[in-house]
Amino acid sequence: MKLVTYQGEHRPRVAAVGPRGLVDLNRADKSLPSCPKPLLAAWAELKSRAEAVLDSDTGVVHESIRLLPPIPNPEKVIGVGLNYADHAEETKMTPPDEPVIFCKFPTAVLADTEPIVLPRKSQEIDYEAELVVVIGQGGRHIRRRRALDHVAAYACGNDVSARDWQNRKPGGQWLLGKSFDSFAPFGPALVTADEVPDPGNLDVQLRLNGQTMQHSNTRQLIFPIDFLIEYVSNVCTLSPGDLIFTGTPGGVGFTRTPPVFLKPGDTVEVEIERLGVLTNPVVAEEK
């Protein structure tokens, strides 16, 4: 099932993509949550009820709406660096023995079709196509053999990065360089995990103004999803709606000769097999 979140009259509401359009699941069945996090947390129990309302006219959203990021307020946005063999090779860095983990502020999340805003404080904004993992059932010290049971959904993502902040600020400002507002687009919808039988074998592409810049497969992941969940959950409790940006393949802009950085007027598309196409225009920050 494909799930989106839209701005309701009083708060964000979750809807499913059905044959007759968007279906507000809570309008169709009051026993279903109106917000995405509790729905994902109990998806195994609620899936059949959600599927039952998709073919009816009940709950169809007819009014004009504004789509939000599929998880508008994630508790955590976790990133993984150097997690594709081809990306480690192009950056001339040795593949790490353990995952390189960083975070992005939750205020960086962005919906499909919303603009990536190039901040005045950076001149080197790069793109990074990524598979995003969305946690459903939370937990701590999750065993690898059960880790995928804690995944509710997947989405396309773009780990937008200010390379001048990341690489040349004192100490290497990964957190700030990755956390400008609008630097974590993901979507266009959440695709529930039951529709993605093998997340370790998905084609990943990024197109910049129609030109393919990245093209790889999640087979190239150095640390697969189940390993990452076990590794991170040994440190912190994962919560429903947490996002894991799992790393980017080769072809990023700063490794090219000459470097390619985002500029106003660009359009960035991230396409991942089974998950759709995430599209974001690029604009300059207003002065």
Image: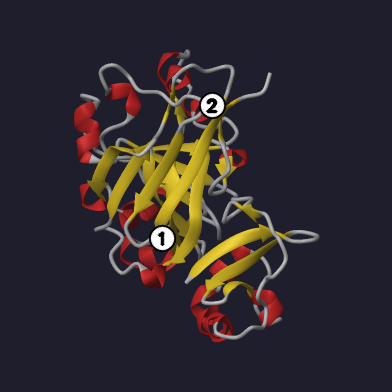
Please say if 150 is above or below 175.
below
Q: Which residue is mark 1?
A: 142
Q: Secondary structure at mark 2?
A: helix
Please name the residue shown 50% across and 29% down the image: 265
Residue 284 lies, in percent from the top left, at: 58, 24
Residue 39 lies, in percent from the top left, at: 59, 70
Q: Is residue 241 left or right of residue 126?
A: right
Q: Which amino acid type is shown beneath numbered disc 1?
A: Ile
Tags 2 and 1 in contact by the CB under 8 Å rule?
A: no
Q: Which amino acid type is shown beneath numbered disc 2?
A: Leu
Q: Nearer the viewer, residue 82 or 114?
A: 114
Answer with the quarter of the image where residue 130 lies: top left
- Mark 2: few/some/many CA within 10 Å (<14, 14-19, 20+): some
Q: Which residue is mark 2?
A: 176
In the rendering, which numbered label is found on residue 168?
Answer: none
Q: Nearer the viewer, residue 259 or 42?
A: 259
Residue 30 appears in the figure: yes
Please name the residue shown 60% across and 49% down the image: 75
Residue 96 appears in the figure: no
Residue 212 lies, in percent from the top left, at: 29, 39
Q: Is residue 89 left or right of residue 76?
A: left
Q: CA distance from mark 2 to mark 1?
A: 29 Å
Please say if 276 is above or below 253.
below
Residue 30 lies, in percent from the top left, at: 71, 81
- Mark 1: few/some/many CA within 10 Å (<14, 14-19, 20+): many
Please name the residue shown 64% across and 83% down the image: 57
Please name the residue shown 65% across and 75% down the image: 60
Answer with the quarter of the image where residue 176 lies: top right
Whichever of labels 2 and 1 marks the residue nearer the N terminus, that label is 1
Q: Nearer the viewer, mark 2 or mark 1?
A: 2
Q: Secondary structure at mark 1?
A: loop
